[in-house]
Amino acid sequence: MSARTRRFEQACVSAGSALVIVYALAPVAWIVSLSLKPAADLGDGRLLPARATLDQYRAVFADPGFAAALVNSLGVASLATALSVALAAAAAYALVRLTFPGRQLLLSAALAVAMFPPVAIIGPLFDLWRVVGLYDTWPGLVLPYMTFTLPLAIWTLTAFFRQIPWELEKAARVDGATRLQAFYRVIVPLAAPGMFAAAVLVFIFAWNDFLFALSLTSTDAARTVPAVIAFFTGSSQFERPAGAIAAASVVVTAPIVVLVAVFEKRIVAGLTAGAVKG
Amino acid sequence: MLDRIGKRFDDGAVAVRDVSCTIRDGELFVLVGPSGCGKSTLLALIVGLETPTEGEIRIDGRRANDVDARDRNMAMVFQSYALYPHMTVRENLAFPLRVARMDRDEIARRVAEAAALLELDGLLDRRPANLSGGQRQRVAMGRAIVRKPAVFLLDEPLSNLDARLREQMRTEVARLQKRLGTTTVFVTHDQAEAMTLGDRVAVLRAGRVEQLGTPRELYDTPVNLFVATFVGAPRMNLMPGRVEGDRAVLPIGDVRLDERLRGALGGRRTFVAGIRPEHLREAGRHASASSVALHATAELVEWLGAETYVHFTVAAQGFDAVRHADARDQRDAGERLSFVARTDGASAAVEDRDVDLAFEPRAVHWFDAATGERLGG
């Protein structure tokens, strides 16, 4: 290949990447811009705000409903993540380490759950939760989040567990560890990157969910940020709430960006080598 | 001790069948066999990672089939070493003690002791990824030693090392075992390792013990063709033979049938004979009245300093081909059988020149042509 075609190829790759980045980040940039504009400038159509102000953020945080929603979001998403990853770890471990009839079927069934459209169960769940008393509570949201993210977590962790040499567990057992000790002292630390990856995915799902949050909550007791944003109104009926919505959106996006930025390294770092020869 | 142990896996594969043996206190017991012979499975049964489907495992006279691995007080070194990659060497060594809830000072003392014994002092804060193969091997040994177990089980611990290091570690393992006096079961596929290390050796094939004895017994009186060819390198020369009158006729020369041999052959007309390379000597230098002379042309001479391997072929027309699976005839198109003789480094053999060899009839091993069993004592 000549240097010229190579340069051309690189140019194409760069241009393509730039296009994707612009396409993906343009709306984000627009929202950030909106969130910084004073209410009067919202319709000016400029990307760079003529006058920047943090008024919208102040307003959003002054809203007691939003503060409560942040707590709800954080609590619900964290709980769902912890439960989902813990259950998935146990399930994935069993799927990898034990041979029992229907193992493949179980994995496929887990995948089928992930394919199931959530919209289809919203109605029944709404009725059920009202009867059982889970409507507008944290567990009422944690349960569906956990359920819908379990398959994803199980598949991710199964892949990670498969890479861990089984001999390590045997060694731990011979060294005097119980099965449980072998699991959490040897297997879990080695699968940590996988656990982080699964946790991040589950957290993002729960954090971003709008459907369940909107349908299964009614008050500040459990309403999460995406749902609360939908109920934003302007400070008067003549004012569009776009600025507040934009500010709130930026606020809820930030933790996800931080989360991915922090854990990406750990995920990419992968397993530390050297367990077995080589 | 193992009593008629059998292991059939869930998928129907039988890995170990009807194995019985007693491993004595303080001895270094070697399980040796080609890959896939069930030796690692046998080890897993002893340590308790697998449960036998037949027979009984007794430890100190007590049935131990269902005793969990963690309660058997045995330590194992895995072929891959199975070091915990997320722990430092120190933590690896301390792991068995920590799960046993030993107190901190005692753990530190024992780790230091093991580290000193295995010369790991400078490496305690490294992780396994930053160790060489030999160092990892020593850490694995150390992790086994710290617990002061009743039995060490070593599963091909040297097979991942390069040749020089392997020999060095082999000596080290033997020395360590003598020093600690701990009963040790050592699994290997390398017959040289088995012979040099073992107090007693069990030769396994296809899940069965073919022969159990001291290295000397295995070498001098192999019970069948499999053991005869498995033990010793270069391997024993095998050839077909038949009885004619008062002589046993072999491609390498005739042997007079004396009383002992006649009894051993027990009326068979054909048989398989074997002779170890070192028993084919250069004539003239070691000749005696009873020795049988043999003239051959040296095809290839391998000089190794202390010894010389002389490869030659012998005509085998008129002899039935050996059909036993463990000793298949490998004669070439010209009906000639390949042999190798091992003589000392002062050998006068030159390639493509005639060489005068001789062997003692007593050194010949006799086997049944059909079953491969040893004939006579």
Image: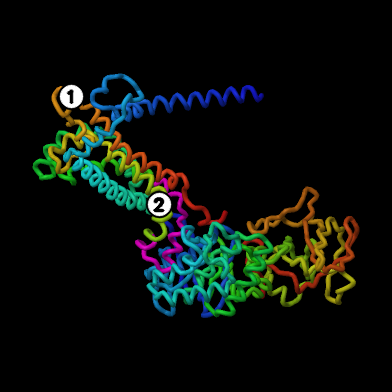
- The answer to which of B89 and A102 lies nearer the viewer is B89
Viewer-proximal residue, A2 or B190? A2
Quarter of the figure with the C terminus of chain B: bottom right
Q: Secondary structure of the magenta portion, mostly? A: helix
Q: Which residue is mark 2?
A: A192
Mark 1: which amino acid?
A: Glu
Q: Position of residue B64 (x, y in %)?
A: 40, 73
Q: Relative to the observer, which residue lies in front, B72 or A142?
A: A142
Q: Position of residue A230 (x, y in %)?
A: 20, 31
- Name the chain letter of the residue that bears numbered label 2: A
Q: Residue at x 40, y 52 (%)?
A: A192
Residue B199 image label: none
Which quadrant holds residue B230? bottom right
Which residue is label 1 attached to? A239
Say which chain tag 1 marks: A
Residue B175, by quadrant, is bottom right
Q: Residue at x 21, y 33 (%)?
A: A229
Q: Position of residue B97 (x, y in %)?
A: 43, 72
Q: In the image, what residue occupies the spot 14% across and 36% down?
A: A124
- Asked if the stretch drawn in magenta spans residue A173, the answer is yes
Where are the magenta residues, as a range? A158-182
The local secondary structure at tag 1 comes to loop
